[in-house]
Image: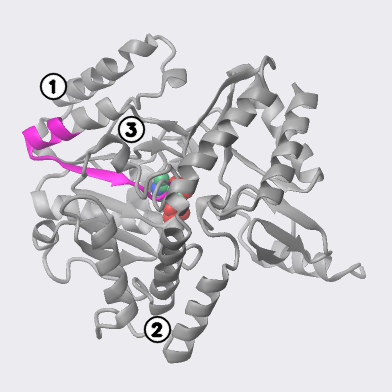
Amino acid sequence: MKLQNKSDEIKEKAKKHLSPVLTRVTELVVDKAKGARFWTADGEEYIDFVSGVAVNAVGHANDAMVQAIKKQAESFIHFGLNYGYYESAANLAEKLAEITPGNLDTVFFSNSGGEAIDGALKLARAATGRPGIIAFEGSFHGRTLGATAITASSSKYRKNYEPILGEVYHSPYPYPSQLKCVNEEEIVPYCLHQLQKIFELRIDPSRVAAIVIEPVIGEGGYYPAPAEFLQELRKMTEKHGILLIFDEVQTGFGRTGKMFAAEHSGVTPDIMVLAKALSGGMPLGAIVASRELHEKWPVGGHGSTFGGNPISCAAALANIAVIEKEKLVERSWELGANIVARLKDSLKGLPGIREIRGIGMMIGIEFHEDFASHAVPIIKQKCLEQKLLIMNCGVQGQTIRLMLPLNINEEDLNQGLSILEEVIKETL
Ligand SMILES: Cc1ncc(COP(=O)(O)O)c(C=O)c1O
């Protein structure tokens, strides 16, 4: 059979040789991307409200990042961080020490969020000498085996891999629509009580190494944990000598209107895990903790061939410099609030919508459960037909999440939002 064009040829090859294990969200063949737009190999132009799943905080192919990547590539591409020091990794570690809260001043670099989560679990176990890990229902932490073990946003992520990691316990996340039998005002005491029950019935707190939480649940539905809950977690973990780990893989680098979501509650975790928007698309993850804690990790107990790759670190430095120079954290807070206000107004009174909410530019339109399963897939498909890429999340797929670049221009923003609004109106 003769293939019609370049796009068909690429697709054919990919379908034949790439593993079918990946969930395929679209059949698009991407050729080029810039800012909040991308173009297919057929020359079709799209607006991108996904940003590589909250990765491209400063837009696709940001000029400053491209320059930094080129410059580093011309010097050297790879060396191995355990074979020598180099400037981009040293500068990035210093920068992360400066911008992360409290005493978090020491960094281990890995290649992805999941890998960094696994490293953080290893650090917690090694430093405390305890086996137990507590995480939260609805959370997503990645696909490596440790991250899979603490993920609880769908049983499909664990199916076929059990038993994964022992001594992992899950407690409810304070997310009202997922805790139907609990009054909204009682969510925080209820969730704290459930944690207490784990200590009483399942594992003594003296055997728990870490509690891991996304300060705003991402994959699980785009809902922020109340500040009070995180503050109580801090007290509880300090009381029992348990390490508190914040997974800021999706929330970090201005997405929530602060550089890190931890700042909304004033809680400094013992370990912060970063990836995604850290390096705006080059593979990089980071485990940030105090020097004192990192020193409890026996030398040689962890490592990585590519972790802290010089190009990824140079890209991350350029990315953070753009976020700071263009005041994108402040913009995220203000623009996010404006977008939520606009959507609340334009979608007012429509059946099926449970809540429109946002914290900075981590914006969710949550649908009632019975609408989620049929309306959300239709909305996604219709948006795609109108050249807008969007994504949903949540255990029931109930939330359409907007992950715009923090520096999106007015034209792309308005055009994309207008398509989304019209599609939602005609679908509900
Ligand atoms: C909160 C959170 N943690 C961890 C991960 C895993 O990151 P990666 O896909 O880079 O392994 C993700 C990915 O979506 C995430 O959203």
**Colour pattern:** one colour
The x and y percentages for residue 317 are 39, 69
The x and y percentages for residue 349 are 67, 14
Indicate yes or no whether the magenta region holds residue 34: no
Quarter where residue 407 is shown: bottom right
Q: How many residues crowd mark 2 within 10 Å: few (<14), some (14–19), many (20+)?
A: some
Q: How many residues crowd mark 3 within 10 Å: few (<14), some (14–19), many (20+)?
A: many
Q: Which residue in the protein does label 3 denote?
A: 136
Indicate yes or no whether the magenta region holds residue 245: yes
Residue type, label 1: Glu
The x and y percentages for residue 213 are 31, 38
- Residue at (29, 74) in percent of width and height: 91
- Residue at (65, 56) in percent of width and height: 36
Mark 1 lies on a secondary structure that is helix
Q: In this picture, which residue range is highlighted in magenta?
A: 234-250
Image: 279 above or below 404:
below
In primary-sequence order, the first of circles 3 and 2 is 2
